[in-house]
Image (tube, rainbow, N blue to C red):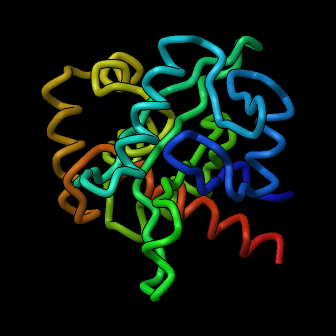
Amino acid sequence: MPPPIGLAAVEATGRIVKANPALERMIEAEDGLLAPGRVLAARRSFELARLRKFIQDAASEESGARGNMLLVGRPSGLRPYTVFVTPFARRASSSARAQPRLALVLVSDPGQYSVDLGARLAELYGLTPAEMRAALGLARGLTPKDIAADAGVGLPTVRTQVRLLMKKMDVRRHAEVVVSILELEALLRAVRSG
């Protein structure tokens, strides 16, 4: 089974230059994500506005954008997609200036995370079980407050767990935790299927 992580390179307008099969399936399902005229969009207007802004920021030459994350709700009632938008770095070449700048869009279906992912995440980064649950919660699009409520602990406890796991993962932002988990999930699925 292909990984449930959708990937696309998009122009500042949102026009899809290249998308992997997982993202194509998400778009075809029309369950929160759309692509009218091959322009990546979200169904709900407030999500569409944020998605467009994040894509424009990431594809902007002046932007020092490092990436932004949003949740895209799904009319089916399934958990929202976690969408991460970051600048797409191309290889330097003489024709690079003539090519439009792109953004990289990663879309995760949080319902697809496996127990194996949590175990591998803990093993790879030396996370405690609580830190692992917090990291997976962030990847599912939960806020620290949501994670605290789910675990039955106080918000300060979860904030400490998140701070410690970010230090262990050598990242500075919640979005970077999510990207690391998406990469690990894709790698695990690729190893299992091939």
Q: Compared with residue 62, is residue 83 higher up or lower down, i.e. above or below?
A: above
The quadrant in which the C terminus is found is bottom right
Give me the residue at 52% from left, 55% from top.
Answer: 104
- Quadrant for residue 18, please give it: bottom right
Give me the residue at 18% from left, 52% from top.
Answer: 164
Image location of residue 51, percent across then percent down? 49, 30
Give me the residue at 40% from left, 37% from top.
Answer: 54
Between residue 43 and residue 138, name the one nearer to us. Answer: 43
Between residue 135 and residue 61, name the one nearer to us. Answer: 61
The quadrant in which the N terminus is found is bottom right
Give me the residue at 17% from left, 31% from top.
Answer: 157
Image location of residue 81, percent across then percent down? 60, 31
Q: Which residue occupies the extreme bottom position in the image?
A: 94
Image location of residue 181, percent across then percent down? 48, 55
Compared across the picture, whether 104 is left or right of 137 comes to right
Image location of residue 136, percent across then percent down? 46, 43
